[in-house]
Amino acid sequence: MNAKDVAWIDLKNATPEQREAQISFMRHMSILMYSISGVLLLAAVAVPKADTSDHPWDIGLAAALFAWALLMWVVRRPPEWLLQAGVLYSITTLSILMGAARPIGATPFFYLWPIVSCAFSFSRRMLWLAIAWMTATLGVALAFFAVGPIKGVMFWSIVTCVSFMGVMISVLRDRALVLVRELELASTTDPLTGLLNRRAFGLAFERDIERAVADERPLSVAVFDLDYFKALNDELGHAGGDEALRAFARVLTSACRPGDVVARMGGEEFAVVLFGAGPEEAERIAERVGQRLREESVGGETPMSVSAGVATLDHGASSPDRLLLLADKALYGAKDAGRSRVAHWDGGVIVGQPQPGLSAAA
């Protein structure tokens, strides 16, 4: 993943909780920014000075800023376009102030507020739009209203410094997000096989159970264990053992359905949540995994086989831990019956036939 391909705010793909948190943060920052700006403008009016011709502009702009802050306060869940419009609104008020201020004083510093908030909260495209709008409105204000021989220097100094700060914030933000996502991926993924790890599997399993109960849909879990893995690992070495685990992960992923939750639970044990699958379909999928594994070999000639246990969401088994326990019991039954076969729990262990072409001691 490259930083340039990442947007900090992706409200279309965010979960409802993430969307609400993002909108709330941007809304509160907007209220704070516009309120403080209005207060500072009124404070500038209160400072005694010889030329007070800009006071009506200051008071009017302060009122406009307070009005937008009030709008953000009233609209509890503003759409993203309204928050983006607020950035352009604040840039416009600042450019008007740049043209009316006598003298200009510290006004240019306040361009940093909308540009930096835009860089932090929105996409790179929105940032370039904000910078372009600042450049255009500032240019008009200085060209037609401001006085003084250094208007050109001031224009380019403001545009360059503020734009550089906005781009730097945007780049740093994206790099930070890439690191966060890499850490999230590392915390949920098994590094050897690329499958989900036990922690992520448990969370997904719990969500699927809640969904199955709510929709009154069947759900099964299948637990797989590579047969005689220790002997295979001793024969091929750790590198060969790792390759065997990766090969089985590929077989398991290809044999399951799109959307099935596939994970490595630890060692040579794997598990799959089969949403919408009753006991018969779950057993067929587990058998298909074993059949496809027959075609795999490690080191060019070492065959592999797998035992599996299946449990279905019924008989009072309504939690991930309970279903995994029953699937494990079925798995032990398959191993006790000679390995290389599927067993399922139906109030007790029911063992299926061994995979064709494999002996009980395969």
Image: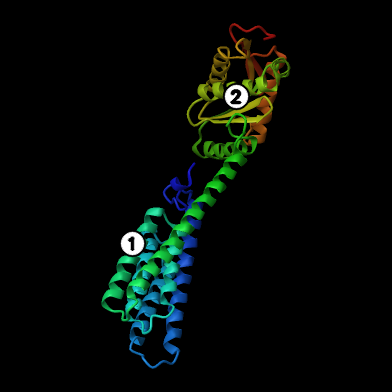
Q: Residue at x 37, y 62 (%)?
A: 131
**C-beta proximity under 8 Å, tags 1 and 2:** no
Q: Secondary structure at mark 2?
A: helix
Residue 271, quarter of picture: top right
Q: Secondary structure at mark 1?
A: helix
Amino acid, disc 1: Ala
Report which residue position mark 2 lands on.
Answer: 246
Q: Is residue 69 visible?
A: yes
Q: Is residue 345 visible?
A: no
Identify whether 251 is placed above or below 7: above
Identify whether 203 is placed above or below 101: above
Residue 204, quarter of picture: top right
Report which residue position mark 1 lands on.
Answer: 132
Image side of residue 93 versus residue 243, left or right: left
Image side of residue 85 versus residue 22, left or right: left
Q: Residue 20 at what x, y percent from top left? A: 48, 56
